[in-house]
Amino acid sequence: MKRNERFDHIGRQLTLNGVVSIKELAEKLGVSSMTIRRDIRKLAEEGILKLIPGGAVLRREPNLIDEREYTVTKAQIQMTREKIKICKRAATFVQEGDTIIIDTGSTTEHLPGFIPPDMKITIVCYCLNTLLNVYKHNKKSQIIFPGGHFHENTLMFESPEGIALIRKTRVNKAFISAAGVDEKLGVTCANFHEVETKKAIIESSDVKFLLVDSTKFGKVTTAYFADLKKFDVVITDVGIPEKYTKILKDLNIKCYTV
């Protein structure tokens, strides 16, 4: 695993849990404890975390990080925070008795944790990380899990039979992720195996929510799955370019920023 990929994982764990263990990180990432020690020492030098015996904790004081100095690691951690905020806002639209679909993605995986645990809803999901979060946080929900071939890079299960099940299921709200949003080339994802499932959930849902952080606007990735006008609501962070705020308004798409 490359250093930046390790930094991304460490940053996400810090943001979600506030603390990381050198031993657990080494086992999870398949590297030596010495490698992890060097990684967290570097992040400590950048002011992102504070070293403690056996691990590190997230520095939460904003003044400890110089916002004028850009690093990939800081951007990744910041985007993780924004993704969590996006999902917290998205969860406010879920109502008792709803049937919802939660799409694959590093943004949407946070959504189950913000849905009230005692709310009785039906959740359609097809990713391992989302399924585990639904099982952990939404004990009173009914789960529909279309299965199929497991894609390790996205933690997604996908098959013709699973897509057919989604097409037969009607849902109130779909919470959809994307890797790129462009005014001309549409809404895209990074993997072709995601495309047919994403198209199916768009066809099967009443209200379609696009959950994307601001770095996705103006970006185009490999696999196209929808025009922007297919969505009813966009939830993003305050960094959304002004150009796209206007585009969404012109398309009569409601936009909420966090």
Image: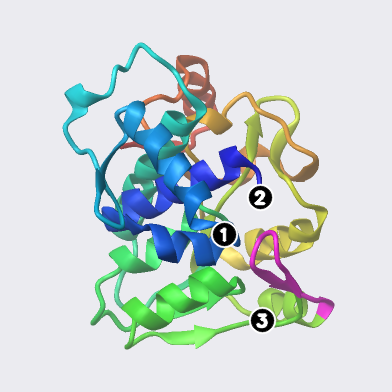
Residue 164 in the magenta stretch? The answer is no
Sooner in the amino-acid sequence: mark 3 or mark 1? 1
Residue lying at 47% horizontally and 30% vertically, measured from the top left: 214
The reply, left or right, for residue 257 in relation to residue 215 is left
- Residue contact at pointers 2 and 3, CB within 8 angstroms: no
The reply, left or right, for residue 10 in relation to residue 224 is left
The reply, left or right, for residue 75 in relation to residue 47 is right
Numbered mark located on residue 29 in the image: 1
Residue lying at 70% horizontally and 59% vertically, measured from the top left: 153
Q: Which amino acid, by three-letter code, is at mark 1?
A: Leu
- Residue contact at pointers 3 and 1, CB within 8 angstroms: no
Can residue 210 be spotted in the picture?
no
Question: Where does the magenta region start and end?
Answer: 150-160
CA gap, disc 2 to disc 3?
30 Å
The correct choice, above or below, for 116 with respect to 180 in the image is: below
Judging depth in this view, the residue of 186 and 24 nearest the camera is: 24
The correct choice, above or below, for 194 with respect to 85 in the image is: below
CA gap, disc 1 to disc 2?
7 Å
The reply, left or right, for residue 179 in relation to residue 220 is left
The location of residue 68, given as percent across then percent down, is 35, 11
Sooner in the amino-acid sequence: mark 2 or mark 3? 2
Q: Which amino acid, by three-letter code, is at mark 2?
A: Met
Numbered mark located on residue 1 in the image: 2
Mark 3 neighbour density, 10 Å: few (under 14) some (14–19) many (20 or more): some
Q: Secondary structure at mark 1?
A: helix
Sooner in the amino-acid sequence: mark 1 or mark 2? 2
The location of residue 133, given as percent across then percent down, is 42, 73
Image-quadrant location for residue 257: top left
Mark 2 neighbour density, 10 Å: few (under 14) some (14–19) many (20 or more): few
Q: Secondary structure at mark 3?
A: loop
The location of residue 210, given as percent across then percent down, is 52, 47
Which residue ends up furthest to the top in the rendered image? 68
